Image (spheres, rainbow, N blue to C red):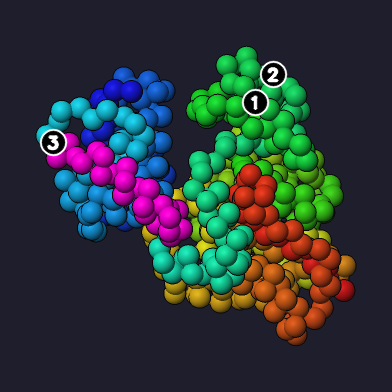
Amino acid sequence: MRLHRNLCFAVIDGLHLIFNEGEYADKVVQQLLKRDKRWGSRDRGFVAETVYQIVRYKRLYAEIADVKEPFDRDNLWRIFAVWATLKGIKLPDWKYFTETPTRKIKGRFDELSKTRKLRESIPDWIDELGIKELGENVWTDEIAKQNEQADVILRVNTLKTTKKDLQLKLQSEEIETEFIPNYPSALKLVERANVFKTEAFKNGWFEVQDASSQLVADFLDVKPGMKVVDVCAGAGGKTLHLASLMENKGQIIAMDIYESKLRKLKVRARRNGVHNIELKAIDSTKPIKKLHGKADRLLIDAPCSGLGVLRRNPDAKWKLQPEFIENIKKTQEYVLQQYSKMVKSSGKMVYATCSVLPSENEKQVEKFLTTDIGKDFNFVKDKKVLAHKSGFDGFYMALLEKK
């Protein structure tokens, strides 16, 4: 493989924005890919995947390169040289690579890879937290899987098409997919491709949604005609799935504290042909109080650490702080207490997170059930999804029924 100067410069610029300016990797990569219209899919793939790989292994590569944050551009080139050397790419004779100790890099990699927190490139405190909550063996397997690139998974929009028809339509646009056993609405891309340019996407035949995330709407046990509240709807991936499971019948109230996210949901709903969603921003306690005792079903897709989706957001491990985890647990307690009041008698509620930590998951549910409000609910079942066992994102979901 030959390195091209303009692509390498794009990678270095991206890493500078992510590591030194605190920008989000997915946003930076989106910007970089618009940089040069002449880039083909291989060029774009190189930029995106190289940036993500170096973000994933920042700690390990920086340690091998013997550089410390904040990284100046020379440091970033040294980290890049480590990445390239470990990939077996011959370094060109550019000035940035004149003193690259190729043989030493491989030796350092072998030595440092014996230690999990360096091999998997995570902060000490996350490693300690993972061991404490999941145990050494499970954590070792889970964090290794979280460092792999995630597959692209689609969820078929059954309001408009079937899984088989979507597969054939994508095939006609030269995108191969395969069914995943036990995931009724999911298609997995055989090779990565820009699915957003397809006719099928523009016509609202599918959304991109990880297979684990697709389990949540199913777990809520909705039926056409129900009144369903999705209280942390965000941009609405699960909301749209609920709409298709309800066959566009009944009412879904999609709520979020961020109005900008609900605006995105509005656009997506239109493309999906969904018309049973009502959007409500949570700008005070009023919208919640108005719905007390009214919901047949309630989905709380709670804010969390995101430690189940590091494959998609590798920069999150560098942005997370221990105090954030402590604060988010308080938020989870609050939303369970306040939002559960919307469920009517005999109604059901799902509490879900994209975290693998028991303290954010089953421990939160156990705690809730001992409170005055929680005593009105029965625990029905829960599901813990670990990436290293499922091959998909780490998730948790618990189904509770109001007495």
- In the image, which disc is placed on residue 390? none
Amino acid type for the residue under numbered disc 3 = Thr
- Answer with left or right where residue 381 lies relative to residue 364: right
Pinpoint residue 53: horizontal percent, then vertical percent: 40, 42
- In the image, which disc is placed on residue 177? 1
Q: Which residue is mark 3?
A: 98
Q: Nearer the viewer, residue 283 or 53?
A: 53
Q: Which range is magenta?
A: 96-120
The magenta stretch spans residue 203 = no
Amino acid type for the residue under numbered disc 2 = Leu
Q: Classify mark 3: helix, strand or loop.
A: loop
Amino acid type for the residue under numbered disc 1 = Thr
- Say which of marks 2 and 1 sits in front: 1
Instruction: Single out the residue that lies furthest toward the bottom.
Output: 372
Q: Classify mark 1: helix, strand or loop.
A: strand
Name the residue at 66% across, 43% down. 211
